[in-house]
Image: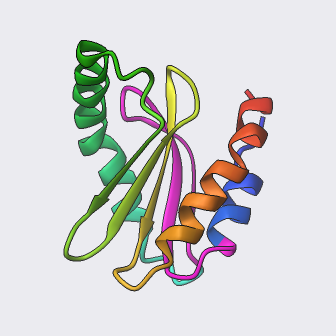
Amino acid sequence: MSFEPTLHKMIDGCPGALGIALMGSDGIPVAEAVAPDGEGGDVVGGAGVEFGRILDEVRKASDAVGGGRLEELVVALARYTLVFRGVDDELFVVAALAPDGNLGKARFLLRRHLSELREQL
């Protein structure tokens, strides 16, 4: 199972995307794709590891208030924006965008290719 072609479709279709990774809930990357300039590799991998713990806390909070499964989380930082999307209970996708990146397009592409990623599991 090779997730990279699907990840490359997502990153190539989104202006301002730096990198995208499929991550396990433990923060270990399963597959990764970076923008042609190569700047996003460190950002997306590190973000997945560090923010993976926050995703666990958000899931727990959602359970506590009866909100259901976490679908998406957007974190806007000064240097980049991170978009997290759950694939299943054990995997999530994280995309890193430049400050002027197209957030709407990134969210759309993550939703659009989600079933493709699930089929590859």
Question: Residue at coordinates 68% horizontally, 42% vertically from top-left?
Answer: 114
Count the labels in the image: 0
Q: Is residue 38 left or right of residue 47?
A: right
Q: Looking at the picture, how far across and down is residue 35, in whole percent?
A: 56, 75
Point out the image quarter for the C terminus.
top right
Q: Looking at the picture, how far across and down is residue 16, in whole percent?
A: 50, 81
Q: Looking at the picture, how far across and down is residue 15, in whole percent?
A: 57, 82
Residue 34 seen from this side: no
Question: Residue at coordinates 28% horizontally, 26% vertically from top-left?
Answer: 56
In the image shown, does 60 or 121 lie closer to the viewer?
A: 60
Residue 107 seen from this side: yes
Q: Is residue 20 left or right of residue 66?
A: right
Question: Residue at coordinates 36% horizontally, 46% vertically from top-left?
Answer: 48
Instruction: Give the answer, above or below, for where 43 lies relative to 17.
Output: above
Instruction: Give the answer, above or below, for where 120 lies relative to 93.
Output: above
In the image shown, does 102 or 97 lie closer to the viewer?
A: 102
Q: Looking at the picture, how far across and down is residue 106, in whole percent?
A: 55, 65
Q: Which residues are magenta?
A: 12-35
Whether residue 32 is in magenta: the answer is yes
Question: Residue at coordinates 68% horizontally, 74% vertically from top-left?
Answer: 12
Q: Is residue 58 left or right of residue 8?
A: left
Point out the image quarter for the N terminus.
top right
